């Protein structure tokens, strides 16, 4: 008899085709880490030295407007440049390169330097969702832009140097590797089953309930069966939506609600400002139809046991493949039981209702 709660086993990531090694037997008691209340400190609502705060000067002397909710601008140190000439180079199929063009944008979530999504209200996060939609639409309508990657890097441990709540949008000619792998798997499943893989997957998860973290009318947050990071979360819509522009008004508010709940639970887990990289995967903007591609968000947080103990992807992970000890079911249970009201902020969240 196999026992997936105790025996080492491999799980298939249906979105990428990769396998993750799960070793639950390595944790005799699954939760061994102590929770530490570290001093999370306070930041000013406006920092005169922050290049993202309203009214402040950025690199090159550009001044931010006195914005009151969200604000986006072209990254002053963009990784991609627009209007570069398309050209390829290939030496014996051994040295292959291709000029890439695109646009990098920065999105400020709030003028408040001291907030994060976790402490913002549903109506404030809704404005971020609206801006994501606007950027996707505007950038994607350019013929030379075929994919719009929206993401957030939060926390110094993720290499984010500025704590001001912000994310980024990189829009480019080619479809980047991660969404491209997922799109291939989505297409395969759709051709075989005539339904989107993530809609089928969510239906199964909603019936099993063991990996669900939070749900509202339109969205669910869960720890994927194949999660690599200890507290990895995926946000999925309950109906087929291939991109942000297909969302109804109420759905955008409910996406804001699920983002609030997930990020608040994350902060509550170790009573800290929980670091992560998160991002949206959705349909490319290459003019094709994507009935097989379901809009979704990934949250990849590095913390393992406390606010100061993170999981390192080294050794076997670098040379073999991803591995984890605590099971996704265990992580989902912990996150599900945590309140979705932020530990610092319960009055604001309580006053919001859908
Ligand atoms: Zn994805």
Image (spheres, rainbow, N blue to C red):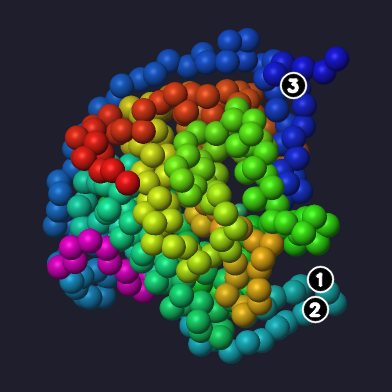
Q: Give the magenta range.
A: 66-80
Of the two numbered discs 1 and 3 in the rendering, the one whose residue sits closer to the viewer? 3
Which quarter of the picture shows residue 276?
top left
The answer to whether residue 180 is left or right of residue 76 is: right
**Quadrant including the N terminus:** top right
- Mark 2–mark 1 CB contact (< 8 Å): yes
In the shown orientation, is residue 329 left or right of residue 269? right
Check disc 3 and report the residue beneath it.
4
The residue that disc 1 covers is 94
Give the structural element (helix, strand or loop) at label 1: loop
The residue lying at 43 percent from left, 56 percent from top is 251
Give residue 269's mark: none
The spot of residue 27 in percent (x, y) is 62, 15
Observer-nearest of 6 and 312? 6
Residue 5: x and y, percent? 70, 18
Residue 68 picture quarter: bottom left
Mark 3 closeness class: few <14, some 14–19, many ≥20 residues within 10 Å: some
């Amino acid at each position: 008899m196999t026992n997936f709660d105790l025996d080492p086993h491999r799980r298939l990531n249906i979105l990428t085709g990769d396998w993750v090694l799960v070793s639950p037997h390595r944790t005799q008691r699954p939760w061994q880490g102590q929770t530490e209340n570290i001093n999370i400190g306070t930041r000013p609502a406006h920092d005169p030295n922050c290049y993202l705060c309203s009214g402040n000067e950025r690199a090159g002397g550009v001044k931010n407007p006195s914005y009151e909710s969200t604000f986006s601008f072209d990254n002053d140190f963009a990784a991609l440049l627009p209007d570069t000439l398309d050209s390829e180079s290939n030496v014996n199929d051994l040295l292959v390169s291709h000029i890439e063009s695109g646009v990098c944008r920065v999105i400020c979530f709030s003028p408040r330097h001291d907030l994060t999504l976790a402490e913002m209200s549903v109506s404030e996060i809704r404005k971020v969702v609206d801006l994501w939609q606007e950027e996707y639409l505007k950038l994607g309508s350019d013929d030379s832009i075929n994919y719009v990657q929206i993401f957030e890097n939060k926390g110094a441990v993720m290499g984010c140097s500025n704590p001001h709540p912000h994310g980024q949008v990189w829009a480019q000619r080619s479809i980047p590797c991660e969404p491209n792998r997922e799109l291939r798997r989505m297409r395969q499943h759709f051709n075989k089953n005539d339904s989107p893989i993530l809609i089928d997957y969510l239906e199964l998860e909603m019936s099993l309930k063991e990996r669900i973290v939070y749900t509202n009318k339109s969205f669910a947050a869960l720890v994927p069966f194949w999660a690599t990071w200890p507290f990895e979360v995926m946000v999925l819509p309950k109906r087929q939506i291939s991109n942000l522009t297909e969302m109804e008004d109420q759905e955008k508010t409910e996406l804001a609600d699920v983002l609030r709940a997930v990020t608040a639970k994350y902060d509550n887990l170790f009573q800290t400002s929980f670091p992560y990289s998160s991002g949206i995967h959705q349909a490319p903007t290459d003019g094709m139809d994507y009935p097989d591609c379901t809009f979704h968000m990934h949250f990849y947080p590095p913390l393992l046991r406390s606010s100061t103990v993170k999981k390192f992807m080294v050794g076997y992970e670098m040379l073999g493949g991803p591995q984890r000890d605590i099971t996704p079911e265990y992580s989902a249970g912990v996150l599900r039981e945590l309140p979705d009201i932020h530990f610092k902020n319960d009055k604001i969240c309580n006053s919001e209702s859908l």
